[in-house]
Image: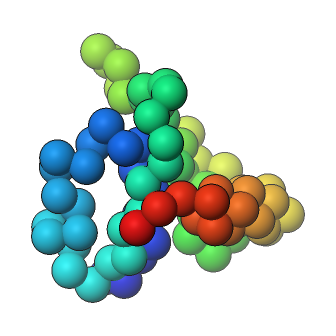
Amino acid sequence: MKAKLLFNESLAYWKAEVKYLKSEVKYTKTGFEPLIETIIRNDKIGIIVWTDKPQGVIIHQKEAAESYDKFFQLMWKTATS
């Protein structure tokens, strides 16, 4: 599956670009360790909070998905390859 993956710089050792060859991978600057994974697909948003007992939620709303996508595109433009 093709995807754009954005990781914190501290996870560069994980080599996502090698594991997901069909994906574009970029990294954000170190400064915090996010515990949240966000997946945007069409009109749905999946949010996973990676704690000792992971929690997740799915939001099924077109306007919310479009807003998250715009935010992701902004983050993508400022990240490094």
Q: Which residue is pictured at 36% across the width and 19% down the height?
A: 51
Looking at the picture, tell me which residue is in the foreground, 57 or 3.
3
Quarter location, residue 49: top left
Above or below residue 59? Residue 62 is below
17 left or right, relative to 45:
left
Q: Nearer the viewer, residue 20 or 43?
A: 20
Q: Residue at x 49, y 42 (%)?
A: 29
Q: How many marks do you count on the picture? A: 0
Q: Which residue: 17% across, 49% down?
A: 14
Please state if 70 lies on the left or on the right of 41 as rendered.
right
From the top left corner, tell me how far across and down residue 81 is, in percent.
Answer: 40, 67
* Residue farthest to the right, as pictured: 63
Q: Residue 38 or 23: which is nearer the viewer?
A: 23
Whether residue 13 sits left or right of residue 44 in the image: it is left
Task: Using the image, determine if residue 34 lies above or below residue 65.
Answer: above
How far across and how far down the image is residue 63, in percent?
Answer: 85, 63
Q: Position of residue 73 (x, y in %)?
A: 67, 67
Question: Can I make out residue 47 in this image?
Answer: yes
